[in-house]
Amino acid sequence: MITPVFINITLDQFTKEVEGYKERGWRFANLCGSTVGDKVEILCSFAQEQEIENLSMLVEKGEQVPAVSTIYPSSFLYENEIFELFGVKFEGTILDYNGSLYVTSVPTPMNPGSLEAEEFLASSDGEEASCG
């Protein structure tokens, strides 16, 4: 059984850690965001043969994160998605859609504390809400 490894890092360590995976021949697997309290968790995943390792860091809403796409170009779509859904901007993204990758009902619908998202969800009267 494969057991993924999770490594907690700080924003200051992010670029160096990502570069280290590239230098050691790891493949980029995924980049995602999720809401954790009033912050956004950025999870950057790498794979090598049967191993999976994940860099995890918490950032403030609106904080800028160095782009992964300058090291692993295929991550540019993930960077754009995280910006649009959570409001975390990746500085230096190689292909920046400037907030127009998706069409959402409210800006940054998954951003912690997003007033627009809270109002939208409250107006749904308990019905399942869609961010798109």
Image (cartoon, rainbow, N blue to C red):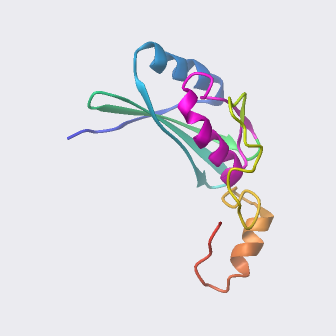
| Rendered view: 105 above or below 31 | below
- Residue 93 is situated, as x and y percent measured from the top left of the image, at 69, 31
Q: Seen in the image, is 47 located left or right of residue 44? A: left
- Residue 10 is situated, as x and y percent measured from the top left of the image, at 61, 30
Name the residue rendered at 70%, 61% in the picture: 109
Name the residue rendered at 70%, 51% in the picture: 84
Q: Nearer the viewer, residue 55 or 107?
A: 107
Q: Is residue 67 magenta?
A: yes
- Residue 73 is situated, as x and y percent measured from the top left of the image, at 57, 28
Q: Seen in the image, is 5 located left or right of residue 104? A: left
Which stretch did the figure color magenta?
A: 63-89
- Residue 121 is situated, as x and y percent measured from the top left of the image, at 69, 75
| Rendered view: 30 above or below 87 | above
Q: Nearer the viewer, residue 131 or 121?
A: 131
Q: Nearer the viewer, residue 95 or 11?
A: 95
Q: Nearer the viewer, residue 43 or 82?
A: 82
Name the residue rendered at 70%, 46% in the picture: 83
| Rendered view: 40 above or below 6 | below
Name of the residue lying farthest toward the left: 1
State the quadrant of the N terminus: top left
Name the residue rendered at 28%, 27% in the picture: 49
Q: Seen in the image, is 45 located left or right of residue 19? A: left
State the quadrant of the C terminus: bottom right
